[in-house]
Amino acid sequence: MSKTILLTGATDGIGLETAKMLVAAGHKVLLHGRNPNKLKDVESALAELNSEADTVSYIADLSRMEDVVALAAAVKQDQTSLDVLINNAGILSTSDPITAEGLDVRFAVNTFAPYLLTQRLLPLMGADGRVVNLSSAAQAPVNLDALLGETELSEDFDAYAQSKFAITMWSRAMALSLGDKAPAIIAVNPGSMLGSKMVKEGFGVAGGDIRIGAEILVRAALDDEFATASGNYFDNDSGKFSLPHGDALDPEKTGGVVQAIEQWLERVK
């Protein structure tokens, strides 16, 4: 059965490869990107892959929360339902790490944007839906001051690891708070050092086959093994569900991260 799937960060790397796999399988894919020209190129490539490709494109800069709100509103206006949300978009390194709203861009794109987008789109999703959040094997305890933009982290990788752990933490917290009558919310490490644009720019290496990451995202979005995995973390390096960093299992620490995100986002509600 065809699903309607919103995929953020669909113009490069794992996101693009995931879009190709989903379209080839006949699903309706809502493509998100920042660059309208890149989105047009992706649409053309997907149409060549499947002449009956059913795609819709949305432009948003996920480092700007007002763009995230506008993206959610556009999807809600266009779509009557949403089966899967894949929060794939992410960032590791940049020459300008502080956003106009005062957040570290890694926390803005990797943590806040998917949280806000998920919240805004939950009304479109049924209990059999899924939210797949891109985590990472890189997980570092979250400095709440850094999360809120009150102190600046000097290392790109530190900011990235904290932001990816923060999304893992809130994925579990949101899943537990919503219970079993809501979409499954699953954090996934797609695989370490895969050949994405992020890895190439951040580490200067070619990286591994990005299809490894795309395949696990498709599985997480569609396969039965993930249907009852809400709140869990899947580590594709080991190929199984695993325990994240211990802080994600600590209700007090996880609650602190969620509370900080919620309080900061009050300004855009």
Image: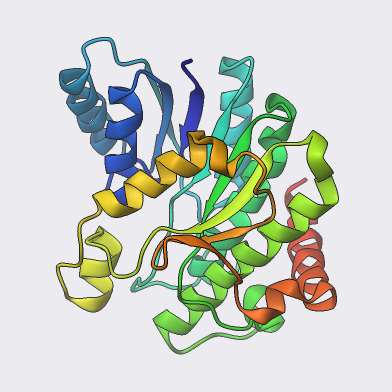
Toward which corner of the image does residue 210 lie, by quadrant? bottom left
Q: Is residue 8 visible?
A: no
Front in this rendered view, residue 44 or 69:
44
Q: Position of residue 21 (x, y in %)?
A: 30, 33
184 above or below 64? above
Q: Quadrant of the C terminus?
A: top right
Residue that extends furthest to the top in the rendered view of this protein: 52
Front in this rendered view, residue 221 or 160:
221
Front in this rendered view, residue 37 or 76:
76
Toward which corner of the image does residue 66 lie, by quadrant? top right
Which residue: 70% across, 79% down?
247
- In the shown orientation, is residue 265 left or right of residue 177? left
Q: How many marks?
A: 0
Which residue: 41% across, 39% down?
218
Q: Position of residue 28 (x, y in %)?
A: 42, 20
Which residue: 84% across, 51% down?
177
Which residue: 30% across, 16% down?
53
Q: Position of residue 200 (x, y in %)?
A: 21, 68
Q: Position of residue 154 (x, y in %)?
A: 46, 89
222 above or below 116? above
Q: Is residue 58 visible?
A: yes
